[in-house]
Amino acid sequence: MTAYYSSFDTPLGPFSVAVNEQKAVVATAFGKRSSLKSRLSECHLISDIRHCSAVEQQVTEYFDKQRHTFDLPLAAKGTSFQHSVWQALITIPYGETVSYGELAAQLNRPRAARAVGRANGTNPICLIVPCHRVVGADGSLTGFAFGEQIKEQLLRHEGGLAAGLV
């Protein structure tokens, strides 16, 4: 598969995005091209800012607190279970968190918290599909591919963590 990518600066450092020919997002990453490439197996990346401009605009608006949801076409590769988890992630409101168990219950799979955690961990479209809004049952910031520090900063940005917590 060929994907078009771009990297740009955010308050949390470089952010990279890959889109397909139809400009649907296939992957994102905090970091530069190498971080993005590690999330895409067998994909040839071509630098193309024009293909990725809508994503950069919406991510910039998010960090400028002008956007709370994204309305971009998505084209992540995954199993039907992964897609069900990723779709549920999109329903978590800006500034709120849920636990892996709560997300599993929402999917009518109350005993599948670990499977939900694995699907959450394999989400290739971070930030836009807000896997950072899922926390441990005790509220701990666990399981973010780009580190707990970035997860904490995203939740603080959204107002999902009170000052002094974590």
Image (cartoon, rainbow, N blue to C red):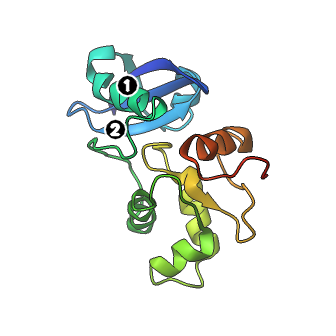
Nearer the camera: disc 2 or disc 1: 1
Q: Residue at x 33, y 15 (%)?
A: 49
Q: Residue 55: image x %, image y %?
A: 34, 30
Vertical relation: 116 (above or below) 19: below
Side (left or right) of 138 relative to 87: right
Element on which disc 2 rests: strand
Which is more toward the observer, 46 or 103?
Answer: 103
Labels 2 & 1 near each other (Cβ < 8 A):
no
Asked if residue 122 shows in the view, the reply is: no
Q: Residue 25 carries which label?
A: 2
Vertical relation: 42 (above or below) 108: above
Q: Residue at x 52, y 81 (%)?
A: 105
Element on which disc 1 rests: helix
Distance from disc 2 to disc 1, alpha carbons, whole Å, reads 11 Å
Which is more toward the observer, 9 or 45?
Answer: 9
Q: Mark 1 points at which residue?
A: 56
Q: Which residue is drawn at 79% across and 48% down?
A: 164
For marks 2 and 1, the one nearer the N-term is: 2
Which is more toward the observer, 136 or 94?
Answer: 94
